[in-house]
């Protein structure tokens, strides 16, 4: 599918100064490095890009933004939270494997210590928290076992596993593939003398406001592999199809609202705003269009989505069936 004409717009000139400040905080001597340190300089730029993109993507989540909109503008939030993160944790590890997801976890863990004047910073973190209770029943001895709840922020998936499942089972939907991935984990029976391996069921009782899916890429994928992987993605899923949900909410659907994506060695934010997808990169923003256009842009620009933020559909509607996203309600 052809990507529609793209509208290019420049963001505020302050973004350039913001990026320079981030680079300097990560490495104060960046400006005087010699040619032998070019690789490290590139790594610093990538880390800075990742951090700023994560913060922008968080701001694009309406339930997150709503809690802070009376205190900060977007630029103020990104600037203050960036400074806080950089002052509390040196960003020294390389941006490999799923390092950008580690940044996100670091940010969420530090938010309760962030002195914003907002009285309930902890609730910002709890929006992303998911408590899973692993359960299994032995098919041989019928022993039921329930393990202590485990805290997670969503799912971490190997990107190529999505396309492998799709190749093997062409008719599986995105949420069906997620369910299969979640239910293939096995543990031996805890009863002495049995030891039979059984599948583990993941049970949740409460729904997070935001569900996160992180994709781990090899970063050497061909265009065809990127296309095959991202074509599996969907902009909506029902969490009760992935976990066994034992709560009482009828609103179990989630919609994709923003993404942290790797394009070359820099990170982009893609966000759903005003019924269209927009790509934020460097000092620019680019109107992409509908979801099919997003999938086309992944292929055309060799973009790898690494963190996907899905927001719970809580029954807020506009008109008869249209869900309100990407704006304060």
Image: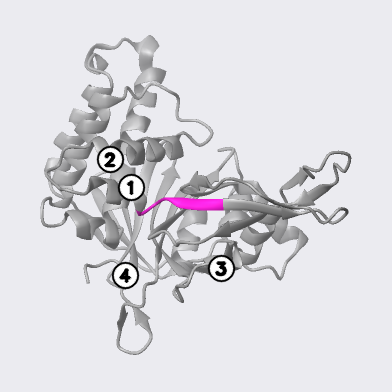
Earlier-in-chain disc, 3 versus 1: 1
Query: How many numbered marks does the figure carry?
Result: 4
Quadrant occupied by the C terminus: bottom left
**Label 2 SS:** helix
- Per the model, the C-alpha gap separating discs 1 and 2 is 7 Å
Query: Residue drawn 38% across and 42% down?
Result: 267
For the question of whether residue 221 can be seen, the reply is yes
Earlier-in-chain disc, 4 versus 3: 3
Where residue 295 appears, x then y in whole percent?
Answer: 50, 62
**Label 4 SS:** loop
Where residue 189 appears, x then y in whole percent?
Answer: 80, 45
Earlier-in-chain disc, 1 versus 2: 2
Where residue 247 appears, x then y in whole percent?
Answer: 50, 68
- Per the model, the C-alpha gap separating discs 1 and 4 is 20 Å
For the question of whether residue 181 can be seen, the reply is no
Confirm or deny contact between disc 1 and disc 4 (CB under 8 A). no
Where residue 286 appears, x then y in whole percent?
Answer: 30, 58
Residue 128 within the segment the image draws in magenta: yes
Residue under pointer 3? 240
Residue under pointer 1? 125
Earlier-in-chain disc, 2 versus 3: 2
Confirm or deny contact between disc 1 and disc 2 (CB under 8 A). yes
Confirm or deny contact between disc 4 and disc 3 (CB under 8 A). no
Q: Is residue 328 above or below residue 58?
A: below
- The boundaries of the magenta stretch are 127-132
- Per the model, the C-alpha gap separating discs 2 and 3 is 29 Å
Q: Is residue 206 above or below residue 110?
A: below
Residue under pointer 4? 325
For label 2, the crowd category at 10 Å Cα-Cα, with few meaning under 14, some 14 to 19 and many 20 or more, is some
Residue under pointer 2? 111
- Viewer-proximal residue among 148 and 217: 148
């Amino acid at each position: 599918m052809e990507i529609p004409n793209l509208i290019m717009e420049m963001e505020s000139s302050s973004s350039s100064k913001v990026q320079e400040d981030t680079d300097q905080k990560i490495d104060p001597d960046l400006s005087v490095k010699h040619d032998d340190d070019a690789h490290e300089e590139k790594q610093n730029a990538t880390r800075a890009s990742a951090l700023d993109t994560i913060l922008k993507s968080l701001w694009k989540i309406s339930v997150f933004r709503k809690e802070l909109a009376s205190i900060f503008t977007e630029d103020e939030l990104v600037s203050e939270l960036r400074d806080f993160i950089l002052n509390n944790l040196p960003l020294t590890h390389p941006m490999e494997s799923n390092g950008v997801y580690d940044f996100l976890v670091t940010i969420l863990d530090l938010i309760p210590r962030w002195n914003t004047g907002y009285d309930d910073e902890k609730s910002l973190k709890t929006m992303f928290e998911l408590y899973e209770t692993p359960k299994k029943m032995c098919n041989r001895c019928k022993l039921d076992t329930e393990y202590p709840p485990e805290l997670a922020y969503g799912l971490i998936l190997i990107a190529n596993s999505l396309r492998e499942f799709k190749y093997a089972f062409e008719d599986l939907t995105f949420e069906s593939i997620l369910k299969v991935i979640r239910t293939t984990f096995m543990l031996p029976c805890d009863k002495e003398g049995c030891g039979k391996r059984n599948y583990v069921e993941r049970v949740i009782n409460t729904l997070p406001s935001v569900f996160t899916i992180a994709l781990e890429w090899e970063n050497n994928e061909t265009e065809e592999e990127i296309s095959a992987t991202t074509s599996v993605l969907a902009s909506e899923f029902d969490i009760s199809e992935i976990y066994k949900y034992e709560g009482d909410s009828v609103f179990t659907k989630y919609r994709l609202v923003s993404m942290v994506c790797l394009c070359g060695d820099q990170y982009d934010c893609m966000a759903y705003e005003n019924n269209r997808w927009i790509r934020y990169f460097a000092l620019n923003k680019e109107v992409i269009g509908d979801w099919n256009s997003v999938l086309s842009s992944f292929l055309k620009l060799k973009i790898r989505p690494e963190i996907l933020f899905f927001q719970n559909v809580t029954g807020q509607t506009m008109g008869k069936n249209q869900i309100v996203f990407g704006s304060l309600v």
